[in-house]
Amino acid sequence: MSTLTQPSALRTTGKYAAIGFYLLFALFPIYWLVKIALTPDALIYSEGTRMIPSALTLENFAAVLQSDFLSYFANSLVVSLGAAAGTTLVAAGAGYCFSRFRFAGKKVIIALLLITQMFPLLMIIAPIYKIVASLGLLNSLVSLIVVYTAFNIPFATFLMQSFFDGIPEDLEEAAMMDGCTRFQALRKVVFPLTLPGLGATLGFVFTAAWSELLFALMLISKNDTMTFPVGLLTFVSKFSVDWGQMMAAGTLALIPSCLFFIFIQRYLVQGLTSGAVKG
């Protein structure tokens, strides 16, 4: 009996050890972020490698909260939520069409969507800048929402298509036989079943827009429309970097994204696991 339980116990111990190691590896950067944010400026360089500083302070957080960073956070929230909502809405409609309908040029459109994912951002930043400037949208949050939405639609469309492919068409046909229109069948039958996919798409786009720097840096130069990734650069001067306040701002920037993921985590987990095996 003991010989049978020993390998099982070893496997269990190894499994939990591997999980613990992964958690340490994943969470250590966050710990270091918070640790530097709580370290007084006088100790950052003298005790930079200590795991636990000899003194703690909230001065860095107070300085950040008294600066323009709250407006940067608000701008990032507007851009991220706007891009996530817009992308999910368009991707859901496009994914449903690709999944349910057969039409001329479908393969060509899918191929074009795939091709758009092959170009590096540095290659197209100049044309995007020229287009945005000609439309008079420089230093506008609208420009970031539109750009982020456009760049995330292809991947989000394929993600949503995989969820629609996993929902049997018989369910819609049965609903329409009972008197529902296609739109009513979509709203009452298909939409509730695709909530995990919508959650996964929202989470993906929100994360991408929340942390994006390149377009925000190129299209936004005014202080009142900066997003927080660009605002972090204000802590970098010509001769020094205010590490304490930068890390404090980074720590605060984790809060909105964490709250957002807590709100959608049930749908996000279902969506990621379902999307891994469907279509």
Image (cartoon, rainbow, N blue to C red):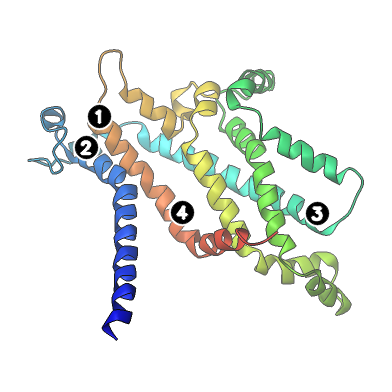
Residue position marked by numbered label 3 in the rendering: 97
Q: Label 1 belongs to which residue?
A: 243
The amino acid type of the residue labelled 3 equals Cys
Q: Name the spot of residue 124 as percent of width and height, x first.
A: 64, 23
| Inter-mark Cα distance, 4 to 2 | 25 Å
Q: Counting other residues with Cα less than 10 Å from the Cα at mark 2, is it few (<14), some (14-19), or many (20 or more)? A: many
Q: Alpha carbon of mark 1 to alpha carbon of mark 4: how far?
A: 27 Å
Horizontal side, residue 80 vs residue 176: left or right: left
Residue shown at the point (62%, 21%) measured from the top left: 123
Residue 27 place in picture, x, y as percent: 31, 49
Q: Earlier in the sequence, mark 2 or mark 1?
A: 2
Left or right of 164, for residue 205: left
Q: SS for tag 1?
A: helix
Is residue 177 shown above or below 268? Answer: below
Determine which of the numbered discs, if any, sits on residue 260 in the image: 4
Disc 2 designates what residue? 36
Mark 2 lies on a secondary structure that is helix
Q: Is label 3 or label 4 in front?
A: 3
Front-most of residues 247 and 120? 120
- The answer for how far apart the CA atoms under marks 2 and 1 are is 7 Å
Element at badge 3?
helix
Dot 3, how many residues are within 10 Å of its Cα: few (below 14), some (14-19), or many (20+)?
Answer: some
Alpha carbons under labels 2 and 3: distance apart: 49 Å
User: Above or below — where is 242 with respect to 2?
Assistant: above
Nearer-the-camera pick, 158 or 70: 158
